[in-house]
């Protein structure tokens, strides 16, 4: 074999990409990734293990995950003309949506927003456009409408609540974007358990709503789902790998939702802690926390201190997320996931020390 030139082997958009970096969290209090901090009681784990014992690991899983789909449709009270597609995390669903588009399609979202929309668009060679939010992190509706007019995006992603800002966009503005769009509008409700607002009852026509069990407390299982009208979901099923949801995930998520009250009480505890954390952050000199409808809080640090404060908190054993390098509206900002009362206390102590 003659020498393989990797610089011409891979597509230029892949060579140009920097790898999605996940920090090594070993040994840290982990408040960087919007995970639910609570584990299950031993009694509950025993019940789960009994269920897993009968999982046929020698067989391929149900390719349609029918029992799980039926359960999720009922939980979300979806009508018969609305179908679900499951993904190995909602990340996979974002990838599937983007893979289905014609070459050179335009994609639209906000800046800032969830980084995967741009990351995947870029490596698939699509034309991603991010429209800056207003300084209060609300949608800049005139600029969004102008971008729709100019680029005619095939897909518009709106994270509701938005990551990493934590806010819910104005419903009227979202509705006007839906009205103006010629393509699909994906409402990404990854943080729906922590918010009091949803577009699930708007699913149909060009509106799809995406959710995940990750932030609810099952990030390790990798399950996301998207609801949309039958004619759209049908096409996406064709490019989904046949067994994308493994048997342990199918069984475990079913088990978890049969015991949904456990997650509801964990979610309530996180929401309670979020309010305490928000007040505590704003009481620290120089810190401004932004209101959040998610399980994390974005906060601003004194000018040009974000990375130093992030590193100081890290040196004190607490890992959060430094979003300052993303620049623009995120300049000087850090993002912390709401953890247990003890974890939050440790974080606040570390932050206070870093700000002294
Ligand atoms: C975390 C997150 C996701 C990805 O969730 P997975 O199901 O774990 O892949 C999608 N969208 C937003 C806005 C997120 O914050």
Image (spheres, rainbow, N blue to C red):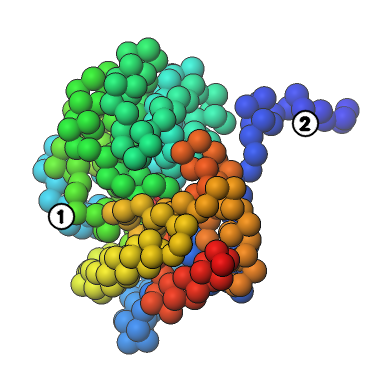
Query: Residue 108 bears which disc, if any?
Result: none
Dot 2: within a 10 Å radius of its alpha carbon, few (fewer than 14), some, or many (20 or more) residues?
few
Q: In which quadrant will I find the C terminus? A: bottom right
Task: Return the residue nearer the eye: 116 or 342.
Answer: 342
| Residue 170 appears in the rendering | yes
Task: Return the residue nearer the eye: 269 or 192.
Answer: 269
Query: Residue 74 bears which disc, if any?
Result: 1
Q: In this image, 7 relative to 112: left or right?
A: right
Q: Residue at x 49, y 21 (%)?
A: 127
| Residue 157 appears in the rendering | no
Q: In this image, 304 relative to 225: left or right?
A: right
Q: Is mark 2 within 8 Å of ligand 1?
A: no
Image spot of residue 327 (x, y percent): 54, 39
Task: Return the residue nearer the eye: 107 or 236.
Answer: 107
Where 350 sits versus 176, above or below?
below
Q: Residue at x 27, y 40 (%)?
A: 169
Q: Residue furthest bottom?
A: 43
Q: In this image, 311 relative to 143: left or right?
A: right
Q: Quadrant of residue 154?
A: top left
Q: Residue at x 61, y 72 (%)?
A: 316
Dot 1: within a 10 Å radius of its alpha carbon, few (fewer than 14), some, or many (20 or more) residues?
few
Image spot of residue 281 (x, y percent): 40, 63
Query: Residue 6 bears which disc, if any?
Result: 2
Q: In which quadrant will I find the N terminus? A: top right
């Amino acid at each position: 074999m003659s020498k393989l030139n990797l610089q011409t082997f891979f597509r230029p958009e892949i060579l140009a990409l920097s790898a999605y970096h996940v920090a090594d969290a070993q040994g840290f209090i982990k408040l960087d990734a919007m995970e639910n901090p609570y584990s299950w009681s031993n009694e509950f784990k025993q019940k789960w293990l009994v269920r897993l014992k009968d999982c046929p690991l020698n067989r391929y899983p149900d390719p349609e995950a029918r029992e799980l789909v039926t359960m999720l449709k009922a939980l979300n009270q979806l009508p018969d003309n609305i179908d679900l597609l499951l993904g190995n995390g909602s990340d996979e669903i974002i990838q599937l949506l983007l893979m289905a588009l014609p070459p050179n399609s335009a994609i639209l979202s906000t800046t800032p927003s969830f980084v995967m929309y741009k990351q995947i668009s870029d490596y698939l060679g699509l034309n991603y456009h991010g429209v800056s939010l207003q300084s209060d992190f609300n949608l800049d509706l005139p600029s969004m409408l102008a971008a729709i007019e100019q680029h005619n995006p095939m897909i518009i992603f709106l994270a509701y609540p938005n990551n990493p800002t934590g806010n819910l966009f104005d419903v009227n503005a979202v509705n006007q974007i839906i009205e103006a769009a010629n393509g699909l509008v994906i409402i990404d409700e990854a943080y729906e358990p922590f918010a009091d607002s949803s577009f699930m009852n708007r699913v149909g026509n060009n509106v799809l709503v995406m959710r995940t069990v990750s932030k609810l407390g099952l990030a390790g299982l990798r399950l996301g789902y998207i609801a949309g009208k039958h004619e759209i979901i049908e096409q996406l099923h064709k490019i989904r790998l046949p067994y994308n949801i493994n048997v342990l995930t199918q069984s475990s998520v079913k088990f978890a939702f049969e015991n949904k009250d456990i997650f509801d009480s964990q979610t309530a505890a996180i929401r309670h802690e979020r309010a305490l954390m928000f007040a505590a952050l704003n009481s620290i000199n120089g810190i401004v926390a932004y209101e959040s409808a998610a399980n994390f809080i974005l906060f601003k640090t004194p000018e040009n201190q974000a990375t130093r404060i992030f590193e100081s908190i890290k040196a004190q054993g607490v890992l959060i997320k430094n979003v300052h390098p993303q620049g623009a509206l995120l300049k000087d900002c850090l993002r912390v996931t709401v953890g247990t009362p003890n974890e939050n206390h440790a974080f606040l102590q570390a932050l206070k020390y870093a700000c002294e």
